[in-house]
Image (tube, rainbow, N blue to C red):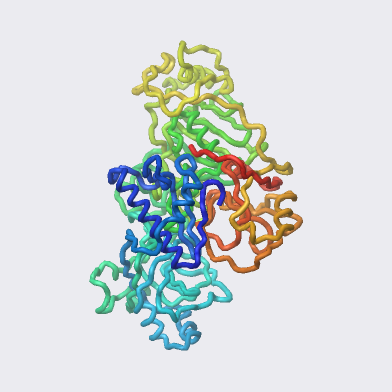
Amino acid sequence: MGRAALLVELDGLDAAMSLYAAIETRRAAAETETVPAGTVPAGDLVDGGADDPFAGVTEVVPAARTVLVRFDPLFTDRDELAETLRGLDVNGHVEHRAKTVTVPVAYDGEDLDAVADLLGLSSQEIVARHSGHAWTAAFGGFAPGFTYLTGGDPIFDVPRRKNPRLAVPAGAVGLAGTFSGVYPRPSSGGWQLIGTTDVPMWDDRRNPPALIQPGDTVRFEPVRAQVTANGSVDTVCDDTVAADASQCETSRETHDAGAESVRDHGRLAVAVTDSNHAGNDASESAVPAADLTIDDPGMFAAFEDDGRRAATMGVTGSGAADPGTFHLANALVGNPAGTPAIETAGGGLRLTAHRTLVLAVTGAPADVTVDGTHGITHIARQEAFLMQPGERLELSFPEQGFRNYIAVQGGFDAPRVLGSASADTLSGLGPAALKPNTPLAVVATATNVPQAPSDGTLPLDKQQSCLQAMCEPTGEPTSCGRSPSKVAGRAVGGADWGREQPACLGAVSSPVPTVGQPQPWPSDLPATGTTTTLDVTLGPRDDWFTAQGITDFLDQEWTVTPQSNRVGLRLHGGRALERRDARELASEGMIPGAIEIPSNGQPVLFLRDQPVTGGYPVIAVLTKSALALAGQLPPGARVRFHINNHGKESSC
């Protein structure tokens, strides 16, 4: 599946789960043998040694009939990994890193009686059979914290509702086919609902946040529902419920899409929560002064970094849509490559600085201006520049391309979920999209950038002369820097804290990090009305399409429709793709860059917020460089696909 993943197809769910368990056991053994416990952060590569084919495996995603194995080609040879997977013992006993989870359920679902009628049983028998068998967590998907449960009573084979509900409450317990599951959050859905639970399936404060993970054993325990005087519902455990009484405590939470908890840090990062949805920690109630304010986010703006790895919990990777441009923004201001930055789409963002900051804007060529006391200055290329208190930055609509990245020296203090500050627009995980008048904090301020004189008389061109002195390897400050476009510099891999600041900066309480080498705006990005060629590798489901379907996929131009976002690009062409195999595809793992073909024959090109699993055949997968380029495709741009099955991609 592309150049950095293998999709292993098996006979059924049992075989898929056996292979998943064998892979996880193999990875755990490799980690135990070669890496001291606790030394590998969550989400990092499992380093089983240079000769271990599992050394670069990054994620394993089980599904109904397949197991998706993602790897880093820099550490793992594709053919060697495939051969090792074929040789794994999936029939013998394998150790599961699993647990037993007891879920109290009030069997009061709207579809309970309908399911009973369908199966020819009483409602009481449905409850007894559903709670009387242990279920096994098979695979995640659909939403963070949602897990497909299998292995219950054999009588359960229930069709989905003909008309899916537009609103299913969090905690709803349902049936679909031979699966059972618990909705982790309010959403639409077509499962038959037979009960509800107050146990949260997902909690950012829990480690891991997902209560149920693949391989776990799940038991449902019947409880009674009582209506209190204020009309709310409390759950009361029966005498036979598990001894852990905390499972029976009411834990319903009101969901507010506009309220975001601030976790994993102690400073302001996103819009302040409503007073009725304040964080649990007392430290979160104190809001520090903002370092800058987003006056207008434009069409769309959110925090992104290098993303997260938690697909087994139903969480997609997210991360910057154009990683190279994102990394350049951080290099320009001297930050580590993965420091959170603001990703904008379609331009229009405006912000105001409240203290002296070093920023950089990269990506789609746009008119970038700084409006201050000394007038408007145009940022003529991708470079670091100074902003003083009260100055305003504005981005116009891009001339070509679609996305820009704004980095600040020190990094934005953004909330992290599962180790990442990336906004997941599909599930709503991570920081919320930025809104007008959003105050933001910077991790390190006041001591790592030059400050203006107390009388505020240092004009921007003089600031840039000082910034030039920061960038130059040798020499004294000069007056040649008349605008940001004249700043010289050198590329850096991170902050150089050993440099002595130039005298024009005055007294600064700590050394100043260097900034990266300025770069011209790119001139070859996609634009509305132009055609961009994207390299792909065919498969894994290209054999589901006729020869004419493959020809039409490669030979015609596809237009990016306005119904596109960070999840994926909906494309439209004159000829829908013809399928050879009309069967319904069981859900299987999905990756960024996969090109899925729904029943209408019009491609959906998945970007960084793609679903963890998908149910339509993937005809091809973009190469790594093509995926980054696709992140810059604006609505109205045209694309062609070109087969590129030669060479190996590196991963940095």
Q: Can residue 348 be seen in this view?
A: no
Q: Is residue 548 visible?
A: yes
Residue 182 in the image: state x and y as whole percent.
42, 68
Residue 82 in the image: state x and y as whole percent.
49, 51
In the image, taking residue 521 as reference, residue 157 lies left or right, namely: left
Instruction: Establish if 539 lies above or below 510.
Output: below
Residue drawn at x 54%, y 36% as measured from the top left: 324
Image quadrant in which you'd find residue 199: bottom left
Task: Report the front residue among 296 and 571.
Answer: 571
Total labels drawn: 0
Residue 327 in the image: state x and y as whole percent.
50, 35
In the image, taking residue 175 as reference, residue 321 lies left or right, namely: right
Q: Which residue lies furthest to the left in this view?
A: 243
Residue drawn at x 44%, y 15% as measured from the top left: 504
Instruction: Establish if 556 lies above or below 10.
Output: above
Residue drawn at x 40%, y 79% as measured from the top left: 153
Task: Report the front residue among 546 and 183.
Answer: 546
Residue 453 in the image: state x and y as whole percent.
43, 20
Q: Which residue lies furthest to the right in this view?
A: 574
Residue drawn at x 28%, y 43% as measured from the top left: 36
